[in-house]
Amino acid sequence: MKIEVSNGEILDKVSILAIKLERITDVEKRLNVQNEWDALQNAVQHITSLAKPLDEFNEVVAGLKATNEALWDVEDALRLKEKAKDFGNAFVVLAREVYVLNDQRAAFKSTINTLTGSSLREEKSYEGY
């Protein structure tokens, strides 16, 4: 099945796949991730060709990946706290970090959409904090 999504959404997915390729060690899971990564590379090349200015685009894409890496780390830490039934201050700090990082992630995706002229745009409607 194929669906249309924004350019930012595609690059977000690809950045998460890149992180999985770096961090997942299970051979079968890595093969599945690699297949998905490979399937998206033509789209990545096309999106990159649309980017103006390219330097800013590359910085934003790198920022998106860094944000997704931070989210991965925070979620891993939250799962460890959950497993230990440790819901103290550290848990609260980590939980709050999730929405801050997700807001950064949304901003990067929106900028990618702008820099590439994406006709599809993801919209958020969160309350400020």
Image: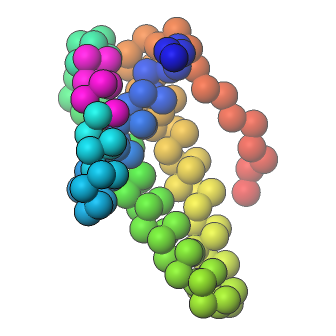
| 32 relative to 110 in the view: left or right | left
Quarter holding residue 37: top left
From the top left corner, tell me how far across and down residue 4 is, in percent.
Answer: 52, 14
Determine whether 51 is above or below 11 in the image. Answer: above
Residue at position x 67%, y 78% in the image: 92
Quarter holding residue 85: bottom right
From the top left corner, tell me how far across and down residue 84 is, in percent.
Answer: 60, 90
Q: Is residue 67 magenta?
A: no
From the top left corner, tell me how far across and down residue 105 is, in percent.
Answer: 50, 44
| 92 relative to 57 in the view: left or right | right
Of 128 and 103, the residue lying toward us: 103
Residue at position x 25%, y 17% in the image: 42
| 105 relative to 42 in the view: left or right | right
Residue at position x 74%, y 44% in the image: 126
From the top left corner, tell me how far across and down residue 87 is, in percent.
Answer: 69, 86
Any part of residue 66 in sight: no
Of 87 and 33, the residue lying toward us: 33
Residue bounds of the magenta highlight = 36-44
| 41 relative to 65 in the view: left or right | left
Determine whether 72 is above or below 33 in the image. Answer: below
Q: Quadrant of the C terminus?
A: bottom right
Q: Is residue 42 magenta?
A: yes
